[in-house]
Amino acid sequence: MIKEIIFYTFSSVLICSSLAVILFRNPVYSAVSLILSFITSGFLWLLLQAEFLAIVLILVYVGAVMVLFLFVIMMLNINNERDKSSFNSLAPFALFIGLIIAAELITLIWINSSQFNINSLSIQEPDQVSNTLALGKELFTNYILSFEIAGFILLLAIIISISLTLRTRKNVKTQIASEQISVDPSTRIKLVDLKERE
């Protein structure tokens, strides 16, 4: 019963933070709300005992992608952000989000405590396979073709994005390696006697 209440509470926080992403006018508020939604989704994965997926979600999306998004947003709107807002105006919202994340984390630690597990959950057998090992076996046996196709599509997306952004510009000096290598060293330096010219 307690796990269901906590699940629905976390789901409500996730829905509210997802709505906040699209309803806030300030892009920094939207990015912080998206961080809260990612962390809450990871905590929901932890409630479902999918620890590997939860850790990957938090490390990849919150630790890398969202930090990059936040930096890009603040760099693009750096002049506007100086005029519109300051650290004092962002601090209460960030503190509120931090308190929500801390409350969710404390709740998860309390659920996974030994006292709660002994009273309401069945004790796991020592020979039980971890979900990371089970996920790896399932991914590289039954879904190996889908995994390879997904990797090929990601590689193709990287190559296409690089080719789209790589433009040749006029009046830009570029190095041509073949011409630099084929140059005769004796013709690169020309010695001039200044006394003879005088």
Image (spheres, rainbow, N blue to C red):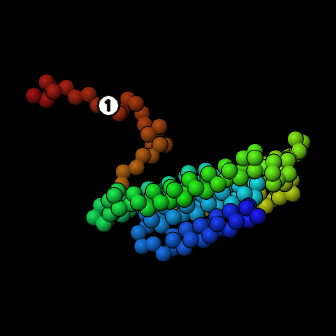
Q: Quadrant of the N terminus?
A: bottom right
Residue at the spot of label 1: 189
Give the percent coordinates (x, y) of residue 79.
Answer: 30, 62
Quarter of the figure with residue 16: bottom right
Amino acid residing under circle 1: Ile
Disc 1, SS? loop
The answer to whether any part of residue 72 appears in the image is no
Give the percent coordinates (x, y) of residue 188.
Answer: 35, 33
Taking the image as shown, residue 13 lies to the left or right of residue 92, namely right
Quarter of the figure with residue 100: bottom right
In the rendered image of this protein, does residue 122 appear above or below residue 185?
below
| Point 48% across, 67% down: residue | 30
Q: Nearer the viewer, residue 39 or 189?
A: 39
Give the percent coordinates (x, y) of residue 110.
Answer: 68, 50
Taking the image as shown, residue 49 lies to the left or right of residue 9, namely right
Q: Nearer the viewer, residue 91 or 177?
A: 91
Give the percent coordinates (x, y) of residue 127.
Answer: 89, 42
Q: Quadrant of the C terminus?
A: top left
